[in-house]
């Protein structure tokens, strides 16, 4: 078995929270009169909450103190968490669940490697609260993707070497993180276009063709 463990990004791979991130950031941006659209929102994939806000603030005319930045980021997260309450097991596609189950029955360990501090909440909403062998997320790291920390910790949590892990990502920053951590990676969605991945997946179940 080439990959003893498979480490999944959460947002954009296991589920789709982009619209909720967008709606929550849009409220903050509107309040501050900052231009913000879905193209800018795409740049926030894989990026931590505070780094995301810095990207939004590139279009802000004035100066903002660290306290204010934290206030607005907290406000965004409060709105985002309310929106996440709309998520349920119905937001987990049959394709994703069946592929995860097949990978597990082949003997792969399955872990999450997400920049999000809300990963546990989202997994619970999806009915996956106890599913993964390990969850490494925004709560156990100090450096966000493209730093490899979140994936290196996930590998440690499941007791495997980086060279024996495959990372699955939808963001360029996530592919860079996997490579920096010494791991092969599979790209899905937008991340395919950057040409960094070991494998490009047309659809999630294509993982079964490359995990051997
Ligand atoms: C990542 C998302 O998974 O988590 C980013 O792709 C997001 O868009 C980041 O900014 C941090 O999320 P949270 O839930 O901790 O604000
Ligand atoms: Mg992602």
Image: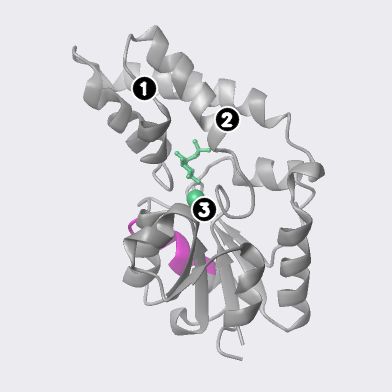
Indicate if the residue with disc 3 has its beta carbon within 8 Å of ligand 1: yes
* Image location of residue 37, percent across then percent down: 39, 25
Q: Quadrant of residue 133?
A: bottom right
Helix, strand or loop for disc 3:
loop
Q: Is residue 6 visible?
A: yes
The residue sitting at 31% across, 15% down in the picture is 34
Residue position marked by numbered label 1 in the rendering: 36
Most frequent secondary structure within the magenta stretch: helix
Q: Quadrant of residue 110?
A: bottom right
Q: Earlier in the sequence, mark 1 or mark 2?
A: 2
The disc label shown at residue 114, or none: 3
The disc label shown at residue 20, or none: 2
Q: How many marks?
A: 3
Could you tell me how far apart the alpha carbons at marks 1 and 2 are, in whole angstroms?
14 Å
Could you tell me how far apart the alpha carbons at marks 3 and 1 are, in whole angstroms?
24 Å
What segment carries the magenta color? 146-154
Left or right: where 56 falls relative to 208: left
The residue sitting at 76% across, 75% down in the picture is 102
| The N terminus lies in quadrant | bottom right
* Image location of residue 151, percent across then percent down: 46, 65
Which of these two is toward me, 120 or 90?
Answer: 90
Does the magenta segment cover residue 210?
no
Q: Are marks 2 and 3 in contact (CB under 8 Å)?
A: no
Left or right: where 65 falls relative to 163: left
Q: Nearer the viewer, mark 2 or mark 3?
A: 2
Does the magenta segment cover residue 147?
yes
Q: Is residue 148 visible?
A: no
Q: Earlier in the sequence, mark 3 or mark 1?
A: 1
The residue sitting at 42% across, 57% down in the picture is 191
């Amino acid at each position: 078995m080439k990959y003893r463990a498979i480490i999944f990004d959460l947002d954009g791979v296991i589920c789709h929270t982009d619209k909720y991130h967008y709606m929550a950031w849009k409220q903050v941006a509107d309040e501050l009169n900052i231009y913000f659209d879905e193209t800018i929102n795409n740049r926030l994939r894989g990026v931590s909450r505070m780094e995301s806000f810095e990207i939004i603030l590139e279009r802000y005319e004035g100066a903002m103190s660290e306290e204010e930045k934290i206030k607005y980021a907290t406000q965004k997260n409060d709105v985002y968490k309310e929106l996440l309450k709309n998520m349920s097991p119905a937001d987990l596609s049959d394709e994703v669940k069946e592929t995860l189950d097949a990978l597990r029955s082949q003997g792969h360990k399955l872990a999450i490697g997400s920049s999000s501090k809300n990963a546990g909440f989202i997994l619970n909403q999806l009915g996956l609260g106890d599913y993964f062998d390990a969850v490494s997320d925004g709560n156990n790291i100090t450096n966000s993707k493209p730093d490899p920390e979140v994936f290196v910790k996930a590998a440690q949590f499941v007791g495997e070497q980086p060279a024996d892990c495959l990372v699955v990502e939808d963001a360029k920053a996530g592919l860079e993180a996997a490579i920096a951590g010494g791991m092969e990676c599979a790209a899905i969605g937008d991340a395919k276009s950057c040409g960094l991945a070991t494998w490009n997946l047309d659809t999630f179940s294509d993982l079964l063709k490359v995990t051997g």
